[in-house]
Amino acid sequence: MSLVVRGALWIGLFLGVTIAPLVFAVIGAPGPGRGFATEFSAALGFVGLALMGLEFALVARFRAVAAPFGTDALVQFHREMGLVGLVFVLVHVAISAPWDLVVRPFAEDTPARVRWALLSTLALLVLVASSLWRRRLRLSYEAWHALHAVLAVVVIVAALMHALLVDHYLNTAWKRALWILMSAAFVTLLVWVRVGKPLTQLRRPWTVERVTPERGRTTTLTLRADGHPGFRFAPGQYAWFALGRSPFSLTKHPFSLSSSGEAAGTVDVSIKALGDFTATVAGLDVGTRAYLDGPHGVFSPDLYEGPGFCLIAGGVGVTPMVSILRTFADRGDRRPVLAVIANRSWDEVTFREELDRLAARPDVSVVHTLDEPPPGWTGETGHVTADLLRRHLPAGHRRWQYFVCGADPMMDAVQDALVALGAAPARIHTERFNWV
């Protein structure tokens, strides 16, 4: 089945699950209508709850779901649907809430359905705010991750209790059963990610075999499969890593794989010291146990046909590009590749020496551009622009496939530049790990 057809089917399923609560509600609804505002508010509440539940599915790391869209698109859609769901819920509350009771939730005459609604709404507000402003709130990724998981369950469970206690639309046993089953399915997705997957990973451990310092404050870890054959991956894909901790630990970190996709039994991951966790990677000991959830992602030339490939990387965004170049070299793939590598300075070019060796192949061209070039530098300088790319892309490049990885502003600018040069947006692929 083609990715387009699979994508259409997943979109149809998403819309179906979103709208299904409205269908359930109106079937056999008791009595006459209660006015447009009340009915509209109820509809928003049902759809908002369904959207909140579907948020679990968008980030449950199912490869079949991500394949037609890419992880970038799913994460962005997750963010946007979270905001849409929040708006629906807030409008529902604004129209329907008995405000004289909301302001005194612990009063004896305040119904339980109001308390559950208030708990769900407050948890949702904190969940969204902590995600949008994590850095301003100075929440570590690990603390945010734990808070996000707990609040998500509170939102769903409390909203379900509110809906069951209202009882106007869920007035029959089969309707209540359907809602309970739907909510249980949403929570089960979270349980699968937190318990089911770790159980499978526990039987497939990895061991840190080598720790190699690289230029640009980057460290390459070579991990060997321990008691199993490992996994095969397409060059450019990534995995989630639990390094020196249990696979059941709440927080795992996503990193691109930097080794050749043709390697068997081992994988390399190259990590730049950019935060609290990544700064500790260089100090890991050989023999450290690790657990991997992967491979994931569609950022790979294996998935897109083209007569040639342009790889554009900023900083540590070079890691999936090195994986692609290493794989092509191991396979003897002779299709032309242009790699444009942007860095602040020459000394910070990660994999500089290996890029030089790979560029010795007749089908590979590597172009470096530096913000702070050393004395006597004759290469490119500054950002990756349309003019820079025009100087190096060959005739017929519009039919090539383009892969871009780096900081978000850099990727946005490069995408605009490529479109200006005539590249079709469908041939431009990005990898973004700045998810929260």
Image: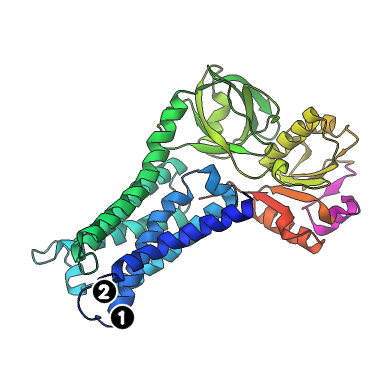
Residue at the image position 54 percent from the left and 23 percent from the top: 284
Q: Position of residue 384 (x, y in %)?
A: 78, 53
CA–CA distance in space, label 2 to label 1: 8 Å
Relative to 116, is 288 on the left or the right?
A: right
Is residue 380 highlighted in magenta? yes
Q: Earlier in the sequence, mark 2 or mark 1?
A: 1
Residue at the image position 66 percent from the left and 45 percent from the top: 299
Residue type marked 2: Ser
Q: Quadrant of residue 76?
A: bottom right
Residue at the image position 8 percent from the left and 63 percent from the top: 108
* Nearer the camera: disc 2 or disc 1: 1
Above or below for 89 versus 397: below
Q: Position of residue 12 (x, y in %)?
A: 50, 60
The disc placed on residue 96 is 2
Q: Position of residue 318 (x, y in %)?
A: 71, 40
Above or below for 392 versus 328: below
The disc placed on residue 48 is none
- Residue sitting nearer the eye, 69 or 259: 69
Write the start and end of the magenta stretch as one range. 377-397
Mark 2 surroundings within 10 Å by alpha-carbon count, few (fewer than 14), some (14 through 19), many (20 or more) = some
Is residue 14 highlighted in magenta? no
Mark 1 surroundings within 10 Å by alpha-carbon count, few (fewer than 14), some (14 through 19), many (20 or more) = few
- Residue sitting nearer the eye, 51 or 211: 51
Q: Quadrant of residue 189?
A: top left
Residues marked 2 and 1 touching at CB (< 8 Å): no
The disc placed on residue 37 is 1
Residue type marked 1: Ala
Relative to 266, is 375 on the left or the right?
A: right
Mark 2 residue element: helix
Residue at the image position 29 percent from the left and 56 percent from the top: 178
Mark 1 residue element: helix
